[in-house]
Image (cartoon, helix red, strand yellow):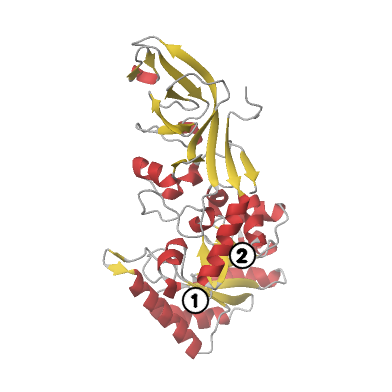
Amino acid sequence: MSENPYPTWIEINLSRIENNTRTVLKNTGVDVMAVVKTNAYGHGAVETSKAVLRAGAKMLAVVRLSELMELRQAGITAPVMIFGGAMASEVDQAIAQTAVLPVYDAELAKIWSDRALALGRRLPVHLKIDTGMGRFGVFPEQALDFARFIGTLEGLEIEGVMSHLAGVGDYGPINSQTQLQRFKGVVDTLAAAGIRPRWRHLASSSAILYEPDSYFNLVRAGGVLYGLGDASDPQGVMLPGLSRSFCWKAQFVSIKRFPEGWTVGYDSTYTTHKDEIIGVLNVGHGDGYLRIPGGSVLVEGRRCPIVGKICMDQMMVSLPHEYPLGTEAVLIGEQGDAVIPPQELARRWASATTFVTNVNRRIPRVYLRD
């Protein structure tokens, strides 16, 4: 029996996250804002934030105030941007926790300024420009007037200007070069008017990989820091210098030999062959492993198929022979020379590579170093 106390767990290699951060810094030649939203893409926000900061990241980024609060409560004092901004009811707490906010609405900006002045603070903001994402931000032709208005609000300090690419390359009626030129035009227009924010940033992970003209003086690194790599690559091949940091494991809690024709799982969708050996892992769709057929796990570096319908808390695996209870299986990640990359499950599940963010928090994260 294994001495591991967990039936299923995720191993996070902090050394790899640190190395990936240093690789991004070296390859881009500019500062890094490390995106640790959604529990650091499922890797654990607190430990991941400490790792990227050790490796040289300049700032962190989350989406909600609650995510910032978690970092502050863990003693992390680095600058943190809240991508989703702050509603009027949240702004006092955001200011108290020294948040950095993207500013994109004049009415909200006025409220933020008033509250910052009432608290004796100045709130750092980044002007958000909509260059084609169609989400947050003012249009490029509005940027100068908006920047001038924000400059009149004594409670706000314009620290940056930012936008977000809808994608890299050609897609639909717009492409990344169009967005890049729009953003450059805004930066130049602001500079001509004497408005030169400290930070200018457009690139997120996909642009870091493929659009070097988009770096400006800060990049927002998310998936690349965790070794998620190129989402479009069918094998999930890592780009030079990057390595995966996420490995989801489980140990078998039951292994037994079945007679021919025995049914397995809900709705009896699978029947056993003669003397087939079935193992049970305490992992299911309640943990974020979707109930979609065709999956497999690694056992001693060998692919073993998941059979029957995946339960909320368990899955059944057909094994080539009997193993001791507690034998490890890998659901995502590497085992010896074999690998199940996130891209493989993303294609089968018709989801983004970053589905690892959906792995349930009830699964312990175990932190390792090389």
State whether residue 365 is above or below residue 32: above
Mark 1: few, some, or many residues within 10 Å (few <14, many ≥20)? some
Q: Nearer the viewer, residue 165 or 280?
A: 280
Say if 256 sits above or below 235 in the image: above
Q: Badge 2: few (under 14), some or many (20 or more) residues near its Cα, within 10 Å?
A: many
Residue 148 placed where, x, y %?
52, 83
Q: Residue at x 37, y 72 (%)?
A: 179
The residue most toward the top is 259
Q: Is residue 238 above or below residue 220?
A: above
**Left or right: residue 154 compared with residue 206:** right
**Residue highlighted by disc 2:** 57
Depicted 148 relative to depicted 317: above or below: below
* Residue at image coords 47%, 60%: 240
* Residue 129 seen in the figure: no
Numbered disc 2: secondary structure: loop
Q: Secondary structure at mark 1?
A: loop
Q: Which residue is identified by label 1?
A: 216
Q: Which amino acid, by three-letter code, is at mark 2?
A: Ala
Q: Which amino acid type is shown beneath numbered disc 1?
A: Phe
